[in-house]
Amino acid sequence: MNLPRPATPLHDRPAPRRWTQIDPILLIVTVLLIGYGLVMTYSTTAETRTFTGDPMQFVIRGAIWATVGMAAMAAIALFDYAWLGAFAPLLYVFTLGLLWVVLAIGTSSLGAQRSVNIGGLSFQFSEVAKVLMIVVLAKFFADRRASIGSPLTMLLGLALLAPAVLLVYRQPDLGTSLVFIAIFFGIAFLAGARIWQLVALVAIAAASFPVVWALLKDYQRARLSAFLDPYADPQGAGWNIIQSLIAVGSGGATGKGLTAGTQSPLGYLPIAESDFVFSGLAEDLGFAGAVILFALYIVLLIAALRVALRAKDPFGMLIGGGVATMLLFQILVNVGMAISLMPVTGIPLPFISHGGSSLVSICFALGVLQSISMRREPEGP
Amino acid sequence: MRQEQRTFVSARRFVAFGIGILVTFTALTARLYDLEIVHGDYYHQLSEQNRIVRLPVLAERGGIVDRNGYVLARNIPGFAISVIPVDLARSREDELSHRLAAVLDLPSDDVREAIRAQRIRNPYEPVRISKTPVPREIALAVTERAELFPGVRVDPESIRFYADGTLYAPVIGYTGPITEQELGKLKDSGYLGDDDLGRTGIEAVYEQYLRGTYGWREIERDAAQREIKTLALQRATVGNTVSLTIDDRLQKLLDQELRKGVEEDKFTQAVGVAMNPQNGEILAMVSIPGYDNNMFARGITTAELAALNADDRHPLVNKAIGDRYPAGSTFKMVTGLSALSEGTATRDTVVNVSASSFSVSGTTFYDWRQHGSLNFVTGFAHSSDIYFYTLAGGTQFAPNVRGVGPDAIAKYARMLGFGAPTGIDLPNENGGIMPDPQWKLATFDEPWTIGNTYQEAIGQGFVAVTPLQLLNAYASVANGGTVWQPHLLKQVTDAAGKDIPIAAWSSRKLEMTQENLRLLRESARRVVTIGHAYMPNLKLPIAGKTGTAEFGASAGKDSAGRNKLGFHNWFVSFVPQADNTDPTAQIAMAIFTYDSSKSLCELCLNPAVGMTQRILEKYLGATK
């Protein structure tokens, strides 16, 4: 306890990196998932390429983003994640700034303002913001290990979270704001928050549902109604759900084969390379393809949890838990939406949805995990 | 330090989290298993239905021609106007609705509603706005000013067109949109919701031949309903051409004469029917007033339909078959044949018509003059009422002649085809009334009287016939005793020119002797040569019988503003090949004039007689 403080800006002690402690499983499964994603991008955009004239356009773009992501992952792994903790307040301000910028100068598409164009590329800052928010919340809870049971800590944490959620919701991007909330709950849970407090929060949210319902936009309400009964308006709000179910179901055990699906190239599946990419995957590669994907995800998540458990400090553990929460929630909501277990929200499926911002952000998060892994206490005595 | 951190972040929470991960993926996998493995086939089928759609390929309806190939009904190109909502800005919806409504003569609210409904249903798919085919000028106006008509699409579509619409409408009828109920029954035969089908006349009766066989096209389409490619194609087969037995030349001759008669105020309505007695082919069938069936083909307006329905002359009824009238003296043939066949009279049965009237139990019966001594031929030729009263019921003028009685008359009348539809290949045929004592008892609960017998003998009273029934009866006498099923269908030819087999026409024999039928033919010829229907400078051996029946009011005006005159006139004729009594006639014709002038009749100027001479001389003059 009375160890001398090191001469660094870090209040946790700096740790040397040990290349041997890179988590190999996490790395391999990351590479496999990126590859799987590129295959799916190829499959779902195969028909589109006949119209654009550049057959591999989407795949090449995906590969470039994958390269950028891998580089980012390596770069982040080199740095001691403790620096992130040191600059957490700055990161928080930066996060809110990014989200504000989206609202201020973002470009609209499909009625929502979610991305910012820079040099001809479009960036979804909220993807990066999710990862930064994990760091901020992890730092917040790691620093409050003594008062974790206090309702005040919860309220402070919520106050930290609320501006980000509201900014994302204003885009409007209900899905991503839900991811933020999920991250909060995940980190709070792993940080040891009182279960009753978390349950109470959920109960309050549930009780305030009528208020939330009133605040929802018409299309969001329609999506919720359609989730409960897609056949009430099969040509309208229920269309996506029904078409997605048809795509998934028609894949059967082994699928129609890569690029052989009919639902997405003919436009029955909207946003087939992103929001509804899982439906395309299940159609092309069937139950088998989906189960392989699930297996990769499980390995990834367990590996992330293992990194967290072995981390040398609470900050690292909570980052690991937060990343796992984010990935799990996105997978659950995206896949659940495709198979009508969840209402329709535009959340990308990690690695599989085509989109640079999402991929690079996840790589960034996994880079942090590798950094944590490399800086854990050596195994054994 | 390390120990402290471990207690801070509980490993149990991480284990719980790990279990949460497994539970989540188990749930997702279970759901996927249900969708892809358990219900995979079902969804696979749905995805095929999504993608592949079978579209009908419409077949052009067959034409209708007369016996010489003159085209009576064909298809001419028209246009359908539709709107694709996705191409129409919401802000211009009202403006366009108003403009289209004005151009197409539709309520603008309907147009707007149709566009709005489609916008919700499927904005990529066009919704048809024009209810009926649009003529070329309007279609051109819309396409040329495309900037005024955003989202509007013009597609070719064919309109049924009837040459000489009004002239042939009673025979050909018209096509019209299929009703919901009909669609229910006909869906399996390939009918579609926006199909037209024959609604009446030949169009309805021979729908099966005219319609053709729709083909189909299986296409792959995308979610926006855009066609990607054709997967399979079955071509449509054009409808067959229906040739009628009608001779357009005769039809037009008849029409001209009858129309002239109406214009000259000799009568207000008229029917002319001609047939070949040798086979029952109808050569002409004119019913005046008629209606223009093109009104129906292009979509009749409510006002037009209301006007037709309100007309007290019933222009929508084909009066050759659809309404019944007293037969008047033409019915004397039936009375005569009954008496001859039962043996109560012969050609030599003499009745001395020594007065022009007589009374039975307080009722006076008249003849039109005091004829003196008449035998069968002169009695028929001069159309003596008393002669035929005597044959039917017996009179004081010939105590030795026994009346044949109403039951026998009814029996032979029915044999000749009265009291029942002739079976012509047209819808809505009236069967007429052929009364007998049982009929009167059943209908009026009154016994038959001798007065009823007298009235029936001269075609008055209860007996009511259609012009076609009368013609067919005379034709059976003219051809030597065969009652044919009159018909309009001559042949059916497919697009390749091959004949399609059609059902044979029925016929039956009269149970009457050739001698008696020959006597009737002789008597009918005498009507023209020495009797009632004098035809000056006649060049043809026309035989026939006049008829006059008084009816209803001879006051007021009909819907066309013509005077109601209170008389019907008939002339039923046939023309043997030579001036003899052989059953060789190739043409028989009935002309019926409704509301003829009384003054004409008092001078015995039955207008039907002169018209018959002119028509037959013109028609047969060219061929003989």
Image (spheres, grey):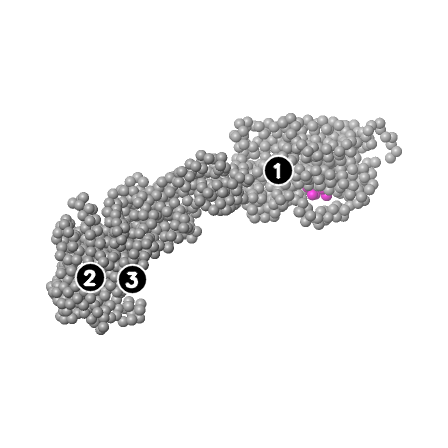
Residue A106 in the image, given as x and y percentages of width and height: 66, 33
On screen, A370 above or below B53?
A: above
> In front of the other: label 2 or label 1?
2
Q: Which residue is found at the position 21% from the left and 68% from the top? A: B365
Q: Closer to the camera: disc 2 or disc 3?
A: 3
Question: Which residue does the numbered mark 2 point to in the structure image?
Answer: B332
Q: Which residue is mark 1?
A: A111
Tell me: residue B137, above or below residue B311. above
Whether residue A119 is situated above or below residue B404 in the rendered picture: above
What residue do we see at 60% from left, 41% from top?
A: A338
Q: What's the CA distance linking mark 2 and mark 3?
A: 22 Å
Dot 1: element = loop
x, y percent for residue B275: 23, 51
The chain ID associated with circle 1 is A
Which image quadrant is residue A91 in? top right
Q: Which residues are magenta?
A: B16-21
Kind of residue at badge 2: Lys
Does the stretch in magenta take in B382?
no
Q: Is residue B618 visible?
A: yes
Callout 2: chain: B
Query: In the rendered structure, which amino acid carries the disc numbered 1?
Result: Gly
Quarter location, residue A263: top right
What residue does disc 3 label? B552
Q: How many marks?
A: 3
Q: Provide the chain ID for the residue under circle 3.
A: B
